[in-house]
Image (spheres, coloured by chain):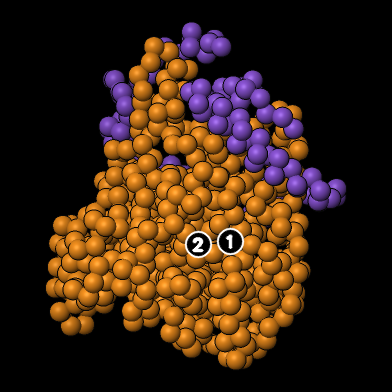
Amino acid sequence: MSIDRATIDYVARLARLALTDEERALLTRQLMDILAHFSMLQALDTGAVEPTSDVVGLANVVRDDVPGPCLPRDAVLEAAPEAEAGYVKVPAVIEAESEP
Amino acid sequence: MGAALDRVTRLEPALHAFLHLTADEARQEARGWDGRYARKGSALPPLAGLPVALKDNLCTRGLPTTAGSRILEGWIPPYDATVVERLRAAGAIILGKTNLDEFAMGSSTENSAFGPTRNPWDPTRVPGGSSGGSAAAVAAGFVPLALGSDTGGSIRQPAGFCGVVGFKPTYGRVSRYGLIAFASSLDQIGPITRTVADAALLFGVLAGRDALDSTTADAPMPDLSAVLNGGVRGLRIGLPREAFGEGLRDEVRGAVTAAAETLRDLGATLVDIALPAIAYALPTYYLIATSEASTNLARYDGVQYGLRVPAAGLYEMYTQTRAQGFGAEVKRRIMLGTYALSAGYYEGFFLKAQRVRTRIRQEFEAAFASADLVLMPTSPTVAFPFGEKTADPLQMYLADVYTIPVNLAGLPGVSIPCGLAGGLPVGLQLIGRALDDETVLRAAHAYERATEWHTYRPRGTGEPGTGNVGTGGAQR
C-alpha cells in the first residue's frame, strides 16, 4: 500500500482538515508506517466470520413517543460562537461547498 | 474536605491533575453535609459529602468541559452527564475536572492541549492516560473517588501507573450520555479509587439502565456489598500465555506472576488458556477506534459550540477551525479513521478489523468455558519518562496492548496494585465475563485484603511536611 501526498490531501478534504506542508509530510510518513504495520491483519483468515459493530446485541431499542424536556434555547445559543434572532449564525453556505 | 483541599493547595501546582478546580463551592457544600451528619437519625445518601474528581470529558452543567482540547476551551455545557446527575443525587461533591489526553486519545496525558499531568510517584514520569489526571488525583490523596473513561485502557492503565484501583465495567453497564464521545462502541465510564470496596460503591451508584443511552444494559445489578467478601475459593483463573511473552518487562512479569500465586494460595485454581488473536488486537482497535472517532469528531466544526475560526466561506471555516482546534494526535487519528472508512479501503481495513474483533470476542468466550476470570498485566511496563514515546505513535499505542482486547470484547476489567518495581507501581489486571462485574470486583477485593500493595503511597502525599512530591520511592 502506498500513501502519497495526493491521498493525504484527499483524506484531509474528506475530514475537513486544513494541513500545513509539515503536517502533510509527517502524516504521509506516519500513516504509511502505521498502515504497513496494521496490514498484519490480512494474515488472519476471517472468511466466514461476521463483523462485530457492537457487543451488547441490542436491536431496535425504542422509547415511548412522549415529548420530554429539551435543552433551553437560550442556554444552547449562549454556547454558540455566533447567534442571531434565535438561530445559530454561519457564513454563506452555497459558494463554500463548491471549493476544491 | 479540609485535608483534601490542603493537599491540593500544596501539591497540585507540581502535579497538574486538574484543569478546573471548584474548591470554594466544594468547601461550601461540605459544610452543608457537616450539618446533616450532626443531626441524628437523618438518612444520608451513599456518597454524602465525599469529594469526587471528574475526567474533563464528562459534561457538567455550569462547569467548563474541555476534553483536553482547544476546540472546546471555554465551553460550558448546558446539561449534566447521567453519571454526574447520579453522583450529585448520591451526595457526592465535585472537587474539579481532571486532565486527560485530548479527547481521551493517548496513554500519557502528554496529548492534553493544556499541558501534561505528572506522576505523583515520580514527577519525571507520565501518570498514564488518558485518565491520567483522575488517577494522579486519587494517588496524591486529593480525592478518594474519581471518574475516568476507558476506550482502550484509559482507566486501567493510568490506575496501574499511579498505584490505585481502576475499574472498567462491562460495556453497557454505565450510561455514556454526556460523555464526550471518542469511539462509541468501546467507550465506558468507570471509577478510579484507593480501594476495591470504594470502586464497587461508586460503580453501584453509576450503573443501571438509562433511557438517554440506548446501549445501556437492562440487566439486574447484584448487591455488591453483599458479594464483595465472597473470596476466590473455587474460582478458576486463566493465564493467557500470549500475555506473558515478548515485550513484557521482567519486573512486571515477576509481580503479576506472584499475584497469580497469591490468588492460588487464597483458594483459586490457575489454568492455562490461549488467546492467540490478541496479537491482532492493537491494529484492530486502532482501525475501529479511529474510524468511530473520525465520525464522532465531525461535530466540531465551529458551528454550534466551541472554537470558531472566522472565514468568508463555510468550507474554510470548517477546515481552519479544525486545523487550529485539534492537536497533532487527534488530527492523526481523524486522518487514519477517515482513510480506513473511505471508498476502496473500507473492506480491507474497517470491515476486516470488525471481523477480527469477532474472533477476539469468540476466543474470550471459549476461554471463559474453562476459566471464570482472566489474569494478565495491566501494562507491559511501569510508568515511562516524559517524551519517551511521543515521537513514535506505534510505540505509544503498544502501552495499551493488554487493555485493548478487553474493550474490543466489551468485558469488565480492573487494575489493582500488585507490586513496586524500582519504586514504581505495577498493575494487576483481572477480566471477567460480560455482565459479571461482581466476580471481577470480588476477586480483586480478596487479593487486596490479602496484600498490602494498596497501602503504599507516593512520598510527600501523606501528612503535610513529609517531603516533596515524587522524591521517589514509597511510604506506607
Q: Secondary structure at mark 1?
A: loop
- Give the letter of the chain under mark 2: B
User: Does B314 sit left or right of B240 as displayed?
Assistant: left
Residue in view at x 61 percent, y 30 percent: A28
Q: Of the residues shown, which amino acid type is indicated by label 2?
A: Gln
Q: Earlier in the sequence, mark 1 or mark 2?
A: 2
Residue in view at x 32 percent, y 66 percent: B470
Q: Is residue B5 visible?
A: no
Residue B290: assigned label: none
Q: Does residue B294 sit above or below B376 in this rendering?
A: above
Measure the C-alpha gap from mark 1 to mark 2: 7 Å
Residue on which the image places disc 2:
B157
Q: Does residue B348 sit above or below B58 in this rendering?
A: above
- Quadrant in which residue B439 is drawn: bottom right
Residue in view at x 55 percent, y 26 percent: A24
User: Does B26 sit left or right of B424 as displayed?
Assistant: left
Q: Nearer the viewer, residue B435 or B444?
A: B444
Q: Nearer the viewer, residue B160 or B3?
A: B160
- Quadrant in which residue B235 is drawn: bottom right
Mark 1–mark 2 CB contact (< 8 Å): yes
Q: Secondary structure at mark 2?
A: helix
User: Does B408 sit left or right of B454 as displayed?
Assistant: right
* Chain B drawn colour: orange
Residue on which the image places disc 1:
B403
Q: Nearer the viewer, residue B87 or A16?
A: A16
Give the letter of the purple chain: A
Q: Does residue B440 sit above or below B335 in this rendering?
A: below
Residue in view at x 27 percent, y 50 percent: B20
User: Does B368 sit left or right of B294 as displayed?
Assistant: right
Q: Return the x and y of residue B238 as percentages of the image width and height.
A: 68, 76
Q: Return the x and y of residue B14 as percentages of the image width and height.
A: 26, 57
- Quadrant in which residue B428 is drawn: bottom right
